[in-house]
Image: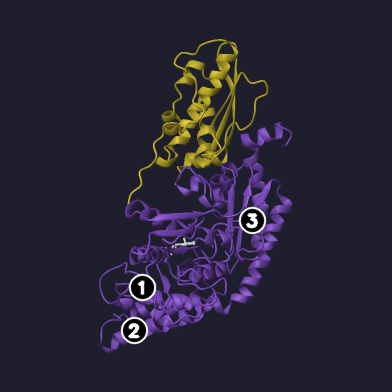
Amino acid sequence: MYSEKVMDHFQNPRNVGEIEDASGVGTVGNAKCGDIMRIYLDIDENQVIHDCKFKTFGCGAAVATSSMATELVKGKTIQEAMEVTNKAVMDALDGLPPVKVHCSLLAEEAIHAALWDYAEKNHIQIEGLEKPKTDIHEGEEEQEEEY
Amino acid sequence: MNKIIYLDNAATTKVAPEVVEAMVPYFSENYGNPSSIYELAGASKEAVSRSRETIAKILGAEAKEIYFTGCGTEADNWAIVGAFEAYKDKGSHIITTKIEHHAVLNTCEYLEKMRKAKVTYLDVDENGLVRPEEVEKAITPETILISVMYANNEIGTIQPIKEIGQIARKHGILFHTDAVQAFGQLPIQVDDDCIDMLSSSAHKINGPKGMGFLYIRKGVKIRSFIHGGAQERKRRAGTENVAGIVGYACAAKRAVDSMEERTKRERNLRNYLVNRIMNEIPYVRLNGDPEKRLPNNVNVSLQFIEGESLLIMLDMEGICVSSGSACTSGSLDPSHVLLAIGLPHEIAHGSLRMTLGEDTTKEELDYVVEKLKGIVEHLRAMSPLYEDFVKNGKK
Ligand SMILES: Cc1ncc(COP(=O)(O)O)c(C=O)c1O
């Protein structure tokens, strides 16, 4: 079901943990739909993401996308991190099964939420960053049933 | 350990060697169509009627009350749609429960949407038990069918079938039970339990997949569902799956002959597994009734953990189990059964079902518990829910 890369990041997740006094923390998702992602960012005075950690409650894909997202933003500037989209995370993992695409959206949202927290704390604006949705399934359409 | 530890016997079971052996001649030598008249076909016809008798006897039924179907799902569909169509002049109300298998639930939903049926989905208590008095309260003059499963496939809860059957009988309403998980595990007598229709499936009792039957009490007139030839007393058309039928009867006989000893052994092992998990892993709850439960069923919720991750990690250790998490159900919602017993979503997502089989050993269970402990620790260390729980002083 999952690509080798997904399995690798699931089995050996990179950057699991917390950062004390993080520059920004973002939590997205909800327990109702079964995945919650929390991302911690440590951002230095040059707006470079020094360190990034995550905690995730969710399926294999949710863990793997969190892990990959942290890898992708680490060492990047905030503006560069803004370019880490869900598609970038998915591509880096050699794709996800269709039903798991929402996990990659969650990873993108989690990074944005952490950046938003950082921006608010420091009273700055990050170009292109919108207030993150708390529920990533907002607006998602129910599958039509067939008879 | 490279060996597979299979703890998903509620999903399906391994076909027993003697069942395979019994089936083989009906593929190769005795391949005649039971409806044909030459001698070659006689063996097939004979085998089908012998098998029907074997199964009927187990239930205390008559051979002509057993109708073979293509699976348990078909038996459920047939019972419900067939009863609805036959009795819709009398009324269109069906009573069932929130914890039925989708074979029943989706069939009822179909009748609601397409045929204007009215369906009452009864609640269950926190252990998953249907209250017979609520069944009785739900009855209206329009009620034509009551369908309550014998035992639940996820949490193993065994329902008070006899009491429900007596209520149905008293009110002159047809009573169907989905006994897919119970047949061969529990001693069932259709007369004692006032059952009018009963569904079963071969692959849950070491028989072949794609083979089921519906017991229909003599005199119950339900409509046919599969139209065509005159097989199954003109009520279920289609050339019989002769080898499947033979395998089913062999598996059923085998399950009943070994029932007492096997279920005793499984119950002991099951209790051992539950005790080890409850004692050695913190923040776990047992789902389902502790007593009124299938002998081989364990269902626990491991708090702060999501089921699919758990399943994949156990799979990497060669352990096959299942979960009621959304990710494993193919939707965003966790199992309807776990929600019906009142579990919050996040706890339902962390459920783990282990269903023992006749080959399960204590050594295997010890191995599973050891692996499970490590995996739970690993996943909790990764869980933001666990982090919050610890930061809030474990409240
Ligand atoms: C309670 C219950 N009903 C019905 C079914 C469906 O049976 P089958 O797989 O033979 O269609 C199952 C098995 O998945 C079950 O557990």
The CA span between labels 2 and 3 is 46 Å
The CA span between labels 1 and 3 is 49 Å
Question: Does residue A26 lie above or below B352 as drawn?
Answer: above
| Label 2 or label 1, whichever comes before in sequence order | 2
Can residue B233 be seen at all in this image of the molecule? yes
Residue A3 in the image: state x and y as whole percent.
45, 42
Structural crowding at the residue carrying mark 1, measured as other residues with C-alpha within 10 Å and reported as few (<14), some (14–19) or many (≥20): few
Question: Which residue is label 3 attached to?
Answer: B368
Label 1 secondary element: loop
Q: Quadrant of the C terminus of chain B?
A: top right
Q: Which chain is purple?
A: B
Label 3 amino acid? Answer: Val
Question: Which residue is label 1 attached to?
Answer: B221
Question: Does residue B368 lie above or below B23 as drawn?
Answer: above
Q: Chain of mark 2?
A: B
Question: Which residue is label 2 attached to?
Answer: B45
Left/right of residue B257 with respect to residue B330 in the rendered view:
right
Residue A52 in the image: state x and y as whole percent.
58, 25
Left/right of residue B268 with respect to residue B328 in the rendered view:
right
Q: Which chain is yellow?
A: A
Q: Chain of mark 1?
A: B
Q: Chain of mark 3?
A: B
Whether the residues at callouts 2 and 1 have beta carbons within 8 Å, the answer is no
User: At x 32% / y 53%, what residue is drawn?
Assistant: B114
Q: Residue furthest front?
A: B141
User: At x 53% / y 39%, what residue is drawn?
Assistant: A32
| Label 1 or label 3, whichever comes before in sequence order | 1
| Label 2 or label 3, whichever comes before in sequence order | 2
Q: Nearer the viewer, mark 2 or mark 1?
A: 1
Residue A13 in the image: state x and y as whole percent.
57, 36
The CA span between labels 2 and 1 is 25 Å
